[in-house]
Amino acid sequence: MLAGLDQSVLLHEHQSAGARLQPGAAPRVLTYGDVPGEYRAAQEGCALFDETDRGRLEVSGPEAAAFLQRLLANDVRAVPVGGGQRNLLLDAKGKVLFDFELYRVEDARFVLSVAPGRAAALRAALERYHFSEKVVFADSSAEYAPLLLVGPRSAALAQQVLGCEVPDEEYRWTEAQFLERPVIAARTRAFGSRAIRLVLRPDQAPALWSALRAAGAAAAGIVVRDCLRVEAGVALAGEDVDETVYPQEARFEDAFSLTKGCYIGQEVVAKIDTYGGLNKRLVVLQLAHDDPVARGTRLFRLDEGEWRDLGVVTSWAYSFVLDTGAVLAYVKRRHQKVGTEFRVGDGPATAVIVKHPLRAQALPASGEFE
């Protein structure tokens, strides 16, 4: 059974296994019932995440590389065939419209892997800048059903199931076979950790999901995803990032280039890098309790004798490292140092900025932490 473009094709498998699902028209797995075990698998073994609802946009043609190089924030021409990168499409004011992964499949063919439900909007945004270039766009989301492996045993488990070695270099990929049908194994990063994305068709996904679980991968959901990314200080598009945010504010330094030359929003990005002046910056704060904190909750601090609104929470998760709640929040400049304390909302609860990433095995955060 094929689901909609932004809905998992594994819902039957999740329901049969008793997974707890997020309510809504396109439900996602919250947890398979053992959050500490799923978190431990991501740290010590291999956690398996359902990404079959992600979107895919293909851009091809003899002028595809030049077209993407002109628009996107990262250096597309530097990507070799068989490689990839993280990239952004910004608006003219230098703010983030789309965050995605770009892979070069052939010299004149690129694949853009995007968040669920975003492929059509990204295509429309790119087509607005398409004039006479020899470029073809194709939304192939209906044929795209990736699975994600996170944890130190991910490569060994992928090799066991697929019979191929996964490249060690980030964003490099290789072709493999599963049940005599093609699968792509790509190195990536996810939630602040090294990861492997297995790219296949929707009708292959249930069998590969079952095979990976049988080989020892622990199915995990978005509760653990948020634990991992909040501990690592990793912003999520749609939750922590929208069109009001500059890439440096979200710590997206690995997704744009300062040397490639012109692209949409480049002058603003370069000016921020040269002169600074960011009004806010994403930080990780340790809460004094483990109760959930709603997105949009304001952070206050006593400054020069009065309480001032100096930040806003964008994500909450329980932190196993801190053994309490933690949040991602945008905090105004001059108040971003580690150890700075805030009042959370209107209540008495407090939160303090902590240095991230919290986990030793997490990837370093993009950009220096003030």
Image: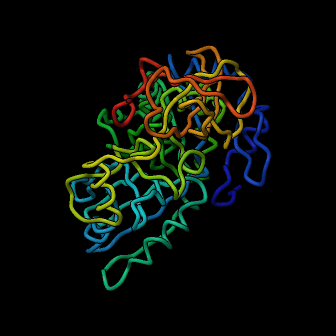
**Is residue 173 in view from this perspective?**
no
Quadrant location of the C terminus in the rendered image: top left
Q: Position of residue 88 (x, y in %)?
A: 40, 56
Judging depth in this view, the residue of 223 and 84 nearest the camera is 223
Judging depth in this view, the residue of 262 and 62 nearest the camera is 262
Quadrant location of the N terminus in the rendered image: bottom right
Residue sitting at 47 percent across and 19 percent down?
359
Q: Position of residue 7 (x, y in %)?
A: 68, 53
| Left or right, 197 with reference to 368 | right
> Residue lying farthest front?
305
In the rendered image, the vertical position of residue 137 relative to residue 189, given as above or below: below
**Is residue 291 in view from this perspective?**
yes
Residue sitting at 41 percent across and 33 percent down?
163
In the rendered image, the vertical position of residue 16 relative to residue 152, given as above or below: below
> Residue lying farthest bottom?
132
Q: Position of residue 110 (x, y in %)?
A: 35, 61
Judging depth in this view, the residue of 105 and 203 nearest the camera is 105
Residue sitting at 25 percent across and 65 percent down?
262
Q: Quadrant of residue 40?
A: top right
Q: How is the image coloured?
A: rainbow
Residue sitting at 58 percent across and 22 percent down?
286
Q: Position of residue 327 (x, y in %)?
A: 60, 31
User: How many numbered marks have been drawn onto this rendered protein structure?
Assistant: 0
| Left or right, 93 with reference to 41 | left
